[in-house]
Amino acid sequence: MERKDNQSPRGHIAGILVEFLEVAITSVVFLKGIYSPGAFERRRYMNVVVQRARHPQLRDYIHSAVSGLLPFIEKGLVERVAVIFFNTDNIPVERFMFKLAVNQSFDSKVEESDLEFSLRSFLVKLSVSQPLTKVLPCDCRWEITAYFRSLPQVSNCKDTELWISTDTKQWQQPPLITPIKSMNSEPLGVQLYLEHPSPSEPKS
Amino acid sequence: MSLDSSRSANSGPQNLKRSFNSNSSNDKGNSSNSKKRKSNQKTLGMAWGPNSLSTSRSSFRSSPFSDFGSYMVEKNRKLQNQFDAEASNSSLSDSSTKPIFHGVSIFVDGFTVPSSQELRRYMLNYGGRFENYFSRHRVTHIICSNLPDSKIKNIRSFSGGLPVVKPTWILDSVAAKRLLSWVPYQLDQLASNQPTLSAFFTSKFSPASEGVFTAAICEVKHATEDLCLKDASTDAKFSEEGEPSEWRKKITEEHDELMRGNTDSKVIEEPSSSYSEASQEVKGVERSYLEQDDESKENNGPQYCPEQPSASVSSHCFDNHSIKGLPHSTALGPSKQRHSTLGDPNFVENYFKNSRLHFIGTWRNRYRKRFPSLPNGFKCVNSHLDVSADTQKTAIIHIDMDCFFVSVVIRSHPELHDKPVAVCHSDNPKGTAEISSANYPARDYGIRAGMFVRDAKALCTHLVILSYNFEAYEEVADQFYNILHKHCNRVQAVSCDEAFLDVTDLEGEDPQLLASVIRKEIFEATGCTASAGIAVNMLMARLATRTAKPNGQCYISPERVDEYLDQLPIKALPGIGHVLEEKLKNRNVRTCGQLRMISKDSLQKDFRFKTGEMLWNYCRGVDNRLVGTIQESKSVGAEVNWGVRFRDLQDTQHFLLDLCKEVSLRLQGCGVQGRTFTLKIKKRRKDAGEPAKYMGCGDCENLSHSTTVPLATDDVEVLQRITKQLFGFFHIDVKDIRGVGLQVSRLESVDTSKQVLERNSLKSWLISASARSEEQCDINGIAKDRVGTDTEGRSMGGNSGVLCTDPVGNSVLRTNNTSNGEGCSNQGLSIPLLCDLDMGVVESLPSELLSELNEMYGGKLVDLIAKSKGQGENSTGSLCFHSPELAKVAVEEAERSRNSDPISLSRTAAEMKGKQHILDGLQTVPDSGAGFNSIAISIQGLDNNDLMPSSLSQVDTSVLQQLPEELRADIFESLPEHRRQEISTLGPNRDNLHHPLCINPPESTDSGLTNTLWIGNPPMWVDKFKVSNLLMLRFFADMYYKAKSAENLSSILQCTIAESLHPLDAKCDAWNEAVHSFNELLVEYIKLKIVVDIEEIYVCFRLLRRLSTRSEFFLEVYNLVFPHLQVSVDENYGGNLHIPLNK
């Protein structure tokens, strides 16, 4: 969770964003109650109480997935990061979408405190958005998926290899969107919303 | 602090009792709270307890006897009757005068300080009413300290339009003995939201009473000045000594005394004064008064009322506490009849009164108070380090009274001196009490502490049993320490009868001789004997005392140490208890000689690092501890495991409350606050019968739960709440409880927690700032008081420099600081003189910092700044500064006017100046809640009749444009109707530079051609709607000005929902046109926001949907725009927005 200081503003923002995503995704997973509450411990991040996974594998998955995104976020390639919950048939039941917008042309120094203020509101809102979500069926799976604006060039960087292209099943119909939180604090814009299958979605 | 003591003195004994005797009312409050949850009235959320029951309301409704309407009517009637009955008993006011709160009926919402029960009591006593349930018809004021954001946003539906006031209002009114205006006490959170301007044009204060107030203030000031002088001298004395921690304690103590004395005298001088907190600011106040005209003087009153009830309450308790001394000081013999929690309502108190362990435990506090020279100890340590560096010949005396608890009691019974005597809390025939101390003749019979009396009597039939005499113990302990301190200034108190002396420094005196002199003196003074051990370190001295006892002394020279230790059983070493002894025995180690065979590494491996090292050192007679190092206690607590028997939960709660009080007192006595709370419970084992010891705990399981809170506390109420919660975790039958203990750990000293606050303050860097400010400041002739300075300052022209304070003034700062309750610990850092400050730096500070600084300077700083600025711009020159707060406002104003020159320069007429004063004053409202009250009042101080210009042509449009929307709306509102037309014409001609929507350039640029409605500040649509002939649109445009953050459509809609209680519809010709316009507005808004802020869109449409159930207009709009919304969302997010149905 340490950030390097000698970075370009853009890399700096990406660093903050990645760190935030790690926390937020953990919060989402906690919120959905996939694992027992005992699998998490309370920590303080940006001065709010958040959950942190205790199980090393879970923690590593989230951490490596998100930090693998860092170079792409820095380049502005990542459009959305999704936490997708599937039922046993691999059909998505609920998707938490983080829509990212990093202003690439922004070059001046970032006021970290402003950014933190905005990001904090996500974590606060997230912790109370349980009623917006659906009850998951038992035996569900989940994964982190990132949506890119364009396919990235194959790079030889190690950690980027952790991300593999996916052919996750999609919904047939446009999903229903329930926004949870939006923020736009130059140069960073993040929006979090929920996607549920539309009622007209063919049941399989 | 001055505030609290004088306030409590003002309102008499009833108030003094407040912190101690509130249990009865609290109990009542809790029981009624639990009932309250069932209510189906609007309770606005209660202070405690989960709301789980509210969900079961429907099930109640179906049950046969649950007609809630009639139930609540009946209940409210009963509550009222109860209240009336109590009120008639406890009303303090004589019947001839009207009670203070006549006609006031309060409802307390949520957590307040003081608690709702205390507020209720005030209402009882001063003729007010207290409503347990909110009702728009009966309640006149809502009292609360804090509101959740949701209630703030929707304040009208929450409060029903009633004033929402801070609890301080009640306290101050009681203190003032008249009903103060609630306006200055309005909840800060609301302050920025309310339609303020016009509210303050009506005068609310009668000049007569204000006259009284000013007189009182002057007297307060008189007293405070006295104090300042004393304080200044104290300061001077101690600042020479260096070593902050050393004199800080001292100064705090002395200062406490001063304050106490001072407030007393103050109370005598002017018992009617309510504004005792004014002593904080008195200096500044008084000074500014000198230059004020009478009118403004009259209107300045209420702002000096205390703003920090929480701080005051806690220190209030502390004050009482220190005055009263520790509770055990009045200990008497044991009560004979009431031996358990069952019979004795004051069980806990009595228990600790009669507890020897408690006496020992709390003795240290007493010692510290009695020998405040304790800090000397620290000094000793420092110098001692030097000493021990060059000369190794240290000499330590350990002195210990011989069987202290017995010998003190029998000194008045010479006939008992050689008889076996034991001390015990009771001598009942069953003999199940435990002996706590026995004298040497008794010890010869094998009688030991901890033995049952009956066993002891079996060993020695003629054993005399005596009970404690705590007063005598205290007396003897004091004499003991007086003697020790007389001979040596390095005394480390171990216990009430045991101490270490470091006599290394006393050159030329033989330690052995000294020890015998001391022992002799002790015997002569107290009639009790003491033993002494002399050696090179504390460990050996202590061991020597062991050999010396009874009534002897022993010297172990460095050469004999090895020899002495060789055969010494390990058990004799301090720090080795049963467990460690057992472990060592298993390794065949019984004496120190054997222990020495084991290597240090091996010891550290087996017994952990520290213990191992200690063992290794001790068995070699090495002890590096220094006399005077005081171990801070790690935890503070109280435990009762004797006589604990409960019948029901209520007993338990009562007991817990008492325990909390005790613990709170102990915390305050130690000057610490804790964060972790552990509740320990001894639970009778299932098979255990009644214990052998009478009312003892017997065979018990020990259970405990603990919790940690983020903020350290010593407050009884918080403790009580936590304890209750902890107790709830146990799920235990109260009849099985045999002992309860509450322990507080993670202690933070009250001083350090204050220090943390202080660290954030600016004092430290101010000093460095002052260093480079030399060239900037013109040190002028010092004017003794502000009138002088003022005129001088003015005559200086545009010079930036200025003004130096006189020494008295400077000391005032410190006093202010201290009485603020934050400062004691920091007094050493002297604040740089005003003239040392770099004005350039100070001016560019943010307003919060500035106000903090200003407080430190007692309000002078801002005057200074304002003046230094005011020179250049004549507009501010004519303002008079009513108070520190106002002056702060003035500074900001001055700053502002400097930043935006056109404003101030474009104004010449005197009327305009007045106007601008208000505008600018108002401008500061959002940033400075504190300044708020004073502004309000100062406005009153000005000419009340015609503040508003008769026409907008007199208003400088550039000023208006610079104002935030809310303020502009305020001003518009307070203009007569016919003037409004002119305003709308002001709208369009503004530049786009400031408009808040500019933050999304990517979209707004490409849609720039089509999206025009949302450009501008206020956006174009507002003007367009304003001139529309359709009521609906005009209404909506009005909402724009009403809404708090008007750049968001959602807040405007929110406002619309809150405002439009009447049906909005009125079909007319232009209906379709209006729908179309509104639709256009929404479409453009969607376009604007869809990419960056879908949340906002979401909120807007949920609100629209809600509106659409009320208004056909909105329904039509909603239906029209909804498809468009879904298309946009689909384009950008690949889905449909899900707008749930809401009622």
Image: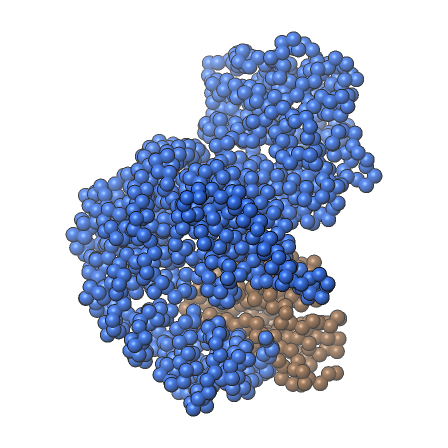
Chain colours: A brown, B blue
Q: Residue furthest front?
A: B96
Q: Quadrant of the N terminus of chain A?
A: bottom right
* Residue A149 visible in the current orientation: no
Q: Nearer the viewer, residue B489 or B987?
A: B987
Q: Position of residue B430 (x, y in %)?
A: 77, 23
| Number of marks in picture | 0
Please state if A121 lies on the left or on the right of B542 as rendered: left
Q: Nearer the viewer, residue B372 or B686?
A: B686
Q: Nearer the viewer, residue B230 or B724?
A: B724
Is B987 placed above or below B634 here?
Answer: below
Q: Position of residue B225 (x, y in %)?
A: 31, 37
Q: Nearer the viewer, residue B174 or B747?
A: B174
Residue pictured at 37% horizontal, 38% vertical: B271
Q: Quadrant of the C terminus of chain A?
A: bottom right
Q: Position of residue B595 (x, y in %)?
A: 70, 27
Residue pictured at 70% horizontal, 23% vertical: B426
Is B327 placed above or below B548 here?
Answer: below
Residue pictured at 51% horizontal, 47% vertical: B124
Instruction: Give the quadrant of residue A41.
Output: bottom right
